[in-house]
Image: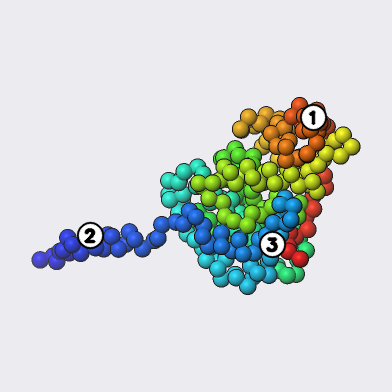
């Protein structure tokens, strides 16, 4: 006679196994706490600096945050809302970038020092995400850019360089991601060291040259790069005449050299 398992025990096993994996923390408390502790805005509010030494001392906490992201399964991810997916990829990119820098810290002056002649640091597969080994370019160029058509993401993901838009001292979260993306772009365009009007010309960061097509696909009403500058004219200059020129798209655009120096707090 075959033994049978009591129905109550079966139900208990099902509940227990179903609760073994805690729900994903969409508040990103682990990463948020680290960012708030080790990232700070500069006084102008347009750039931030990172205490990589502090992150190194807290590497155990950082790995806990990274492990939480790595544990997300593809089926679970596909059930999330678009804002939740965006927040996940932006936070993963930024947190794993910090981890990448720590693999060479303190002996590097730029994230590019972690690359080689045959492979850039952004093509280096060193972490697990959505069930496979990944590199940072996979997040940016294979997921974010082609699947979400959100040009403000270029002001949200941080490449650990002074030339890059700031790493925010907080996690991105789905409930506020629209405001966070807009604020990140506003802060970036308002930083006169990287985007400015000079001698009757608009001098902007090289990101707008590299990813110009992303800003001209019509998302959010942006059909020309100049449309973006018109939208954020009040952040880019205090002069009424210059704001009017930006809104009219009347200023010729040139692109500034990119500063790949590490965005480290001194």
Q: Are marks 3 and 2 in contact (CB under 8 Å)?
A: no
Q: In the picture provided, is 151 more to the left or to the right than 238?
A: left
Residue at x 60%, y 46% (from the top left corner) = 180
Callout in the foreground (3, 2):
3
Q: Are marks 1 and 2 in contact (CB under 8 Å)?
A: no
Residue at x 63%, y 67% (from the top left corner) = 55
Between discs 3 and 1, the one toward the N terminus: 3
Mark 2, Cα crowd under 10 Å, few <14 / some 14-19 / many 20+, is few
Q: Is residue 154 visible?
A: no
Which of the pair 222/170 is nearer the observer?
170
Count of numbered marks: 3
Between discs 3 and 2, the one toward the N terminus: 2
Q: Quadrant of residue 21?
A: bottom left
Callout in the foreground (3, 1):
1
For disc 1, the marked residue is: 245
For disc 2, the marked residue is: 11
Which of the pair 87/29 is nearer the observer?
29
Q: Is residue 91 visible?
A: yes
Q: CA distance from mark 3 to mark 1?
A: 36 Å
Q: Position of residue 85 (x, y in %)?
A: 51, 47
For disc 3, the marked residue is: 50
Q: Position of residue 167 (x, y in %)?
A: 66, 54
Between discs 1 and 2, the one toward the N terminus: 2
Q: Position of residue 173 (x, y in %)?
A: 53, 50
Q: Secondary structure at mark 3?
A: strand
Mark 3, Cα crowd under 10 Å, few <14 / some 14-19 / many 20+, is many
Residue at x 60%, y 39% (from the top left corner) = 150
């Amino acid at each position: 006679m075959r033994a049978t398992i009591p129905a109550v025990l079966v139900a208990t096993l099902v509940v227990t196994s179903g609760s073994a994996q805690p729900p994903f923390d969409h508040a990103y408390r682990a990463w948020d706490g680290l960012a708030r502790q080790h990232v700070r805005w500069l006084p102008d509010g347009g750039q931030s600096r990172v205490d990589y030494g502090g992150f190194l001392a807290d590497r155990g906490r950082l790995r806990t945050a990274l492990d939480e992201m790595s544990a997300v399964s593809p089926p679970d991810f596909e059930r999330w809302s678009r804002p939740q997916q965006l927040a996940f990829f932006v936070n993963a990119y930024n947190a794993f970038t910090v981890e990448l820098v720590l693999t060479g810290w303190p002996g590097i002056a730029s994230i590019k020092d972690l690359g080689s002649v045959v492979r850039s640091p952004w093509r280096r597969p060193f972490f697990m995400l959505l069930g496979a080994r990944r590199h940072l370019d996979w997040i940016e160029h294979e997921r974010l850019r082609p699947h979400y058509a959100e040009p403000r993401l270029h002001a949200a993901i941080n490449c650990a360089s002074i030339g890059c838009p700031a790493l925010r001292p907080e996690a991105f979260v789905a409930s506020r991601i629209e405001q966070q993306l807009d604020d990140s772009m506003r802060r970036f365009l308002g930083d006169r060291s990287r985007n400015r009007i000079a001698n009757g010309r608009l001098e902007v960061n090289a990101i707008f040259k590299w990813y110009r097509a992303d800003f001209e696909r019509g998302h959010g009403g942006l059909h020309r790069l100049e449309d973006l500058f018109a939208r954020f004219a009040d952040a880019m200059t205090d002069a009424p005449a210059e704001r009017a020129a930006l809104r009219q798209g009347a200023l010729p655009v040139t692109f500034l050299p990119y500063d790949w120096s590490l965005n480290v707090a001194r």
